[in-house]
Image (cartoon, helix red, strand yellow):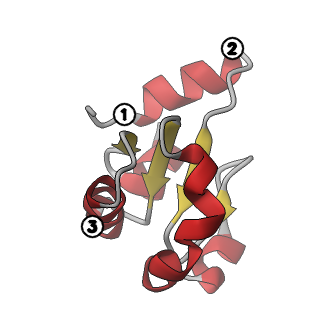
Amino acid sequence: MPDITPAELKQRQAAGQTPTIIDVREPWENEEGRIEGSQNIPLGTLPQKLEELEDLKDQEIIVHCKGGGRSATAKAFLSQQGFTHVRNLVGGFQAYQQS
């Protein structure tokens, strides 16, 4: 699944679309700022949260972190677990804030 740009995500949000957004940053990072509607699941806890995400296996999931590295790891992990529509937010939260 191709990654998504901050501009594309903001455009979809402005149109009232609400994709599932998972913030894989640490809780303290999430407290400093977050994308509205996102849920915080730190990368290190993602394996333990798979059961909770099971219903989303065939739905679009957008993962993000601060700059895109951890979320790229999350995308690869979720894809290996059978999630079929995982997209990484290009540039992470920093790029989203600046766009």
The residue that disc 3 covers is 73
Distance, label 1 to label 3, CA atoms, is 15 Å
Distance, label 1 to label 2, CA atoms, is 16 Å
Q: Is residue 67 left or right of residue 10?
A: left
Which residue occupies the foreground of this view, 5 or 81? 81
Residue depth check, mark 1 versus mark 3: number of the one nearer the observer:
3
Q: Secondary structure at mark 1?
A: loop
Q: Which amino acid does the dot numbered 2 rest on?
A: Ala
Q: Secondary structure at mark 2?
A: loop
Count neighbours of disc 2 (C-alpha within 10 A) and say few if under 14, some if 14 to 19, many if 20 or more: few
In the depicted structure, whether residue 32 falls above or below residue 55: below
Count neighbours of disc 1 (C-alpha within 10 A) and say few if under 14, some if 14 to 19, many if 20 or more: some
The residue that disc 2 covers is 15
Q: Position of residue 8 (x, y in %)?
A: 45, 24
Which residue occupies the foreground of this view, 26 or 77? 77
The mark that comes first in sequence, 2 or 3, is 2
Work out which quarter of the rendered image holds the N terminus and state it: top left
Quadrant in the rendering for residue 26 = bottom right
The residue that disc 1 covers is 4
**Residue at (30% x, 65% y) in the render:** 77
Q: Is residue 14 left or right of residue 44?
A: right
Count neighbours of disc 3 (C-alpha within 10 A) and say few if under 14, some if 14 to 19, many if 20 or more: some
Q: Secondary structure at mark 3?
A: helix
Q: Which amino acid does the dot numbered 3 rest on?
A: Thr
In the depicted structure, whether residue 49 falls above or below residue 76: below
Callout count: 3
Q: Which amino acid does the dot numbered 1 rest on?
A: Ile
